[in-house]
Amino acid sequence: MADFIFNVLKKIRNLLVGAVGAFLIRLIGSTLQIQVKDDSGFLSQTNAATPVIFAFWHNRMFLMPYLHRRFLHGRRVICLVSASQDGEMIARVLARFGLATVRGSSSRRGKEAFRELTENLRQGWDVAITPDGPRGPRHQAHVGVVGLAALSGCSLIPATWMVKWKIELPSWDRFIIPLPFSPCIFHVGQPLPITDAAGEKGLDESRRTLETRLMEMEPNPKFSRTFQPSIST
């Protein structure tokens, strides 16, 4: 009986977290002064038939569902989420934005998740992955996302967002929550093609290239003092 009650309470908690989390993301996102920086014109492409793999740092997760709904609503995206209890709550939030999930990480259901994502890409779904998640180290890309791109033949699209006013949590990734009405840049980088012909050494070089691209997209120390956006509608 105790186990039944505990499971019911856990499900209620997850439902509440999903609803409240999605509400807060929408509420904050709707107030932001967003400017788009699209290095290759990817967001203006009308053809969504070719799937891609979006890669962004773990601490940028908060705003990504809102940015997808606003700027990428025509694309079907499936997100890799940890198989942990925290992952369950994240999956509930993502579902509120119409985003599907595959559960797994390097320590749990990793191989199964890799196979599922490969099949999803073959079926025309985009995939979203945090290459330094779910446990870090912060801003160090794992090779798995590069291996997925090589196997599927899909390009990696580095992406990030930055805000002038924010809260930075004391977590391993320094998770960022934007403050309402903050100026914001949504930055979509140049596609990074990956080939599986280069072997293990080539994959590691591609991993380091992705890591470098994402770090180059990070705001410089003067960003919060100097950024004045032109508003994107």
Image (spheres, rainbow, N blue to C red):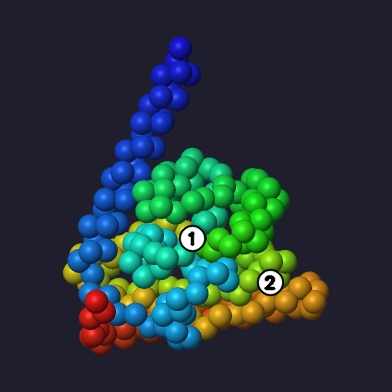
The one of 222 and 101 positioned closer to us in this rendering: 101
The reply to whether residue 174 is in sight is no
Whole-angstrom CA distance, mark 1 to mark 2, is 18 Å
In this picture, is 213 found above or below 128? below
Q: Nearer the viewer, residue 210 or 53?
A: 53
* Disc marking residue 118: none
| Circle 2: residue type | Gly
Q: Secondary structure at mark 1?
A: loop
Q: Which residue is mark 2?
A: 153
Label located before the other in sequence (1 or 2): 1
Residue type, mark 1 in image: Arg
- Left or right? Give the position of 61 relative to 110: left
Q: Locate residue 121, reporting x and y percent.
A: 62, 61
In-image side of 127 versus 149 (left or right) = left
- Residue drawn at x 49%, y 46% is 87
Q: Is residue 100 above or below residue 76?
A: above
The residue under the point 58% across, 71% down is: 50
Q: Secondary structure at mark 2?
A: loop
Identify the residue at image location x=39%, y=64%: 73
Packing grade of label 1 (10 A; few <14, some 14-19, many >=20) is some
Would residue 172 be seen by someone viewing this image from the given angle?
A: yes
Quadrant of the drawing holding the C terminus: bottom left
- Give the residue at mark 1: 76
> Measured from the top left, where is residue 59 in percent x and y?
43, 63
Q: Position of residue 229 (x, y in %)?
A: 24, 84
Mark 1 or mark 2: which is in front? 1
> Which of 27/209 is in front?
27
| Outermost residue toward the top in this view | 1
Quadrant housing the N terminus? top left
